Amino acid sequence: MASLSMRPPGLEVVNLYQATGQNVVGLTDYVVKWASPTDAWNMFWWGANVFIFHGILAVVILTWSIIAAIYLYFYIRDRKPERLMMLKILVPTVAILTAIQGFVLGHLQGELVLQDDPLKLAALEGMFWSGLRVDPLTSFLAYGTFNHAFWGYFSWPAYERPPAFVFVFYWVFMVIFGILLGVWSGALSLWYLFPGFFGRFGWAKTLANFFERSGVYLMPFFAAFASIGGAVAAESGRYPFILVQADPNPSGGPPIITGVPVGPVACLIQRFTSQFGLRCLCSLLR
């Protein structure tokens, strides 16, 4: 649930040192508790489900892309019908799952960031300015208009901001490579499922040959780097806080970002032992 640094509803982060002048065994000033015992069920809120299925689907897409590339490699060389039969299952599945990952789960996860973590949103979308400014593309994706203003990345103090490289891993790796994976798998799906229709066009056969020969190497590449980009973009949000919450600013400035501070070393350990590490491990074991 902390993969995007957002706390589930009902979970409270209390600065014990500010409240009582004491800390926990001299180690931390923060205590995390539920507002009421029944709020513990909020661990299963719909946002957590979005995180879970988004991560699982990334592993599935990566695994199936590698398997599809292996079948594609041998099919190009021997053109055996049994390999084509498998490709008619594998490649369209990758295309469909990639579409679900981007247009459904990705959209829902983006809504969570929009609602609960404006600073992370600014980092992901590359809003590298100070104060309020209109961002037409983000405004259209989020609200369906072109005139909504957002607080820029530099509106918050430097110690609160997540790393600026989050933008690169989000847009270049996850978004662009995810789109390219959809293009390659979608084009090959159309060719394999409807060869009678597209076979009438000479240009279609030339394109299919290009997508086949390049897809052997590019499909696993796109899937791997899109998965890595998504993992790094999500896990980088842990620094400098985990379980982040954005509260309205009484003075009218950018939302006040609160949470449990985490140092760079702890952040690095978390990244390599959590989502990113598990994805790589699962892929290698499979």
Image: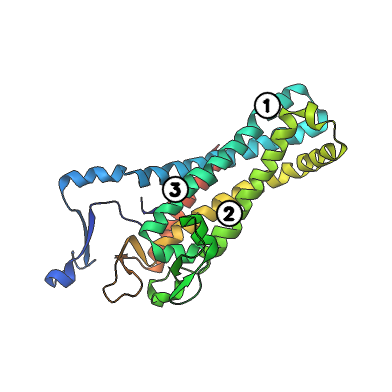
Density class for disc 1 (Cα within 10 Å; few <14, some 14-19, many ≥20) is some
Mark 1 residue element: helix
Label 1 and label 2: CA atoms lie apart by: 28 Å
In the picture, the quarter occupied by the C terminus is top right
Front residue (pair 7, 283): 7
Label 1–label 3 contact, CB within 8 A: no
Residue 135, above or below 12 = below
Mark 2 residue element: helix
Q: Residue furthest left?
A: 20
Question: Residue 10, how many percent across, how many down?
Answer: 23, 52
Residue matched to label 3? 108
Is any atom of residue 37 visible in this view? yes
Label 2–label 3 contact, CB within 8 A: no
Residue 286, above or below 279 = above
Label 1 and label 3: CA atoms lie apart by: 32 Å
Label 1–label 2 contact, CB within 8 A: no
Density class for disc 2 (Cα within 10 Å; few <14, some 14-19, many ≥20) is many
In the picture, the disc for residue 175 is: 2
Query: Could you tell me the amino acid type at mark 1?
Result: Met
Residue 75, above or below 8 = above
Q: Residue furthest top?
A: 82
Density class for disc 3 (Cα within 10 Å; few <14, some 14-19, many ≥20) is some
Mark 3 residue element: helix
Question: Residue 151, how many percent across, how many down?
Answer: 42, 70
Left or right: where 163 falls relative to 24: right
Residue matched to label 1? 86
Quadrant in which residue 243 is drawn: bottom left
Query: Could you tell me the amino acid type at mark 2?
Result: Val
Q: Which numbered disc, 2 or 3, marks the residue closer to the eye? A: 3
Q: What residue do we see at 47% from left, 44% from top?
A: 105
